[in-house]
Amino acid sequence: MLRASLLTLVLLIAGCAAPPPSTTSPRPSPTREPGTYAVTAFLDLSGTRGPRGDAQRTAMQRWADAQRGTPRVKLRIVDVAGSDTKLLLALKRAADAGDTDAFIVGVPAVLDDTLARAIALVGRPVLFTLPIAEPTGDGARWIFGLAPTSDAIARALVDALPSRRTFTILVTSGSLASGREELAIDTVFRADGRPLPFVMTAAPDRTFAQRFRPFASTGSDVFFTGPTIGYLDPVRIVPAADPPTNARLFLSYLTDVNDASRLGETAARVRWPGLRRPTSAGLSTQAATATDALAMLAASADAAGDPERTRARIEGSTFAGIATTYTFSASRHSGVDPREIEMLAWENGRVVAARPIGAPAR
């Protein structure tokens, strides 16, 4: 009912005259400045949903300040405060204003029918910096994923386990992003014929730590699904177990630098999936991907502001970015090669490519 209500809201705002996603090309924005390309980025800079968009904001602003050449990207950042409804309304409002040529979505949005149809109505390229499923249906032609899909990330996580026989715990927070990751991991376990993980729900109080502590001294593998912000306290409680924990802890791709810096003494046993290249550049995966999104739009922008031409250039190109090399096609709008996924860790005050858990520090 909630998703149906959101869709009704979007369609009402769009108005009866809004064209469907047809084969005709959307008209260029009538108010765009010559020599510029206007990009609006949606981030969570407030609210309770993780990951926070601060690292992405800083990276994009630095790129925008340092850019050279034409067209010059005009960056506008909108805080959607952890709300999917605000994301839908902000997307439509910016499109109606006629001053945005493309959008970047840097929040853990679930690409459902409601959001896909809203993007179809907008008729502008929309680049996602965090994981989404391979786009299908309404709006798919405008949607580009600059992160691995949830299925690819789940496969990388399961393949990182040292043994098929270790006891596995899957912790969920109840959020949409957490549920999406839980389903993807469960699917990989079933495909491999592994014993299914024991599922625990992380409560907002300390009862979760009490329930989890008996497992902490075992050699268990623990997946914390969804944004890390809801797990930081439970994860940091683990070393206090008696005897000390031997568990291997795996966080989500949604883990950002701020989350990692708060792991404390637990960091030595924590890993999470990301992209391998940004660590050598001293960047987080999310910050590098956000920078790549701006650079990709600048490289693909049509001088006349025709969104269809920009979309076609992205779809038919390979782009060498900071985070990875992105390749799109008419049938593939998730541009990351799954082989680029690597386990990351927090070590000596920075994100690094992970060594095996228990190996000596560098």
Image: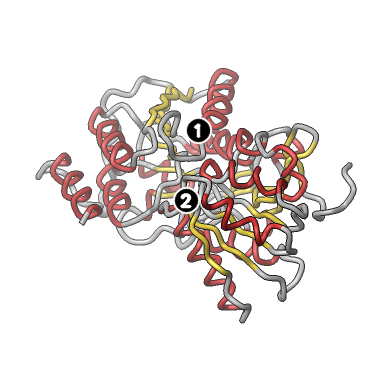
- Quadrant of the image occupied by residue 37: top left
Image quadrant occupied by the N terminus? bottom left
* Identity, as a three-letter code, of the amino acid under mark 1: Gly
Relative placement, left or right, of 125 versus 186 is left
Q: Residue at x 55, y 53 (%)?
A: 335
| Left or right of residue 39, residue 193 in this image | right
Q: Quadrant of the C terminus?
A: top right
Label 1 – label 2 distance at C-alpha:
24 Å
Identity, as a three-letter code, of the amino acid under mark 2 = Ala
Residue 64, given in percent of the width and then of the height, sits at 53, 22
Q: Nearer the viewer, residue 356 or 212?
A: 212
Residue at (65% x, 35% y) in the render: 262
Mark drawn on residue 53:
1
Determine whether the residue tagged by mark 1 lies in a helix, strand or loop: loop
Q: Residue at x 38, y 28 (%)?
A: 78
Q: Position of residue 86 (x, y in %)?
A: 30, 36
Residue 322's label in the rendered image is none
Crowd rating for badge 2 (residues with CA inside 10 Å; few <14, some 14–19, many 20+): some
Residue 226 placement (x, y as % from top left): 51, 51
Tag 1: Cα neighbours inside 10 Å, few (<14), some, or many (≥20)? Answer: many
Q: Which residue is situated farthest in the bottom direction here?
A: 193
Q: Which mark is residue 203?
A: 2
Mark 1 and mark 2 lie on one chain; the one further toward the N terminus is 1
Total marks drawn? 2
Q: Is residue 114 above or below residue 277?
A: below
Residue 285 is left or right of residue 86, and the answer is: right
Vertical order, 136 against 26 (above or below): below
Comparing 100 with 182, the one in front is 182
Q: How is the rendered protein coloured?
A: secondary structure
- Residue ID at (38%, 20%): 34
The residue most toward the left is 16
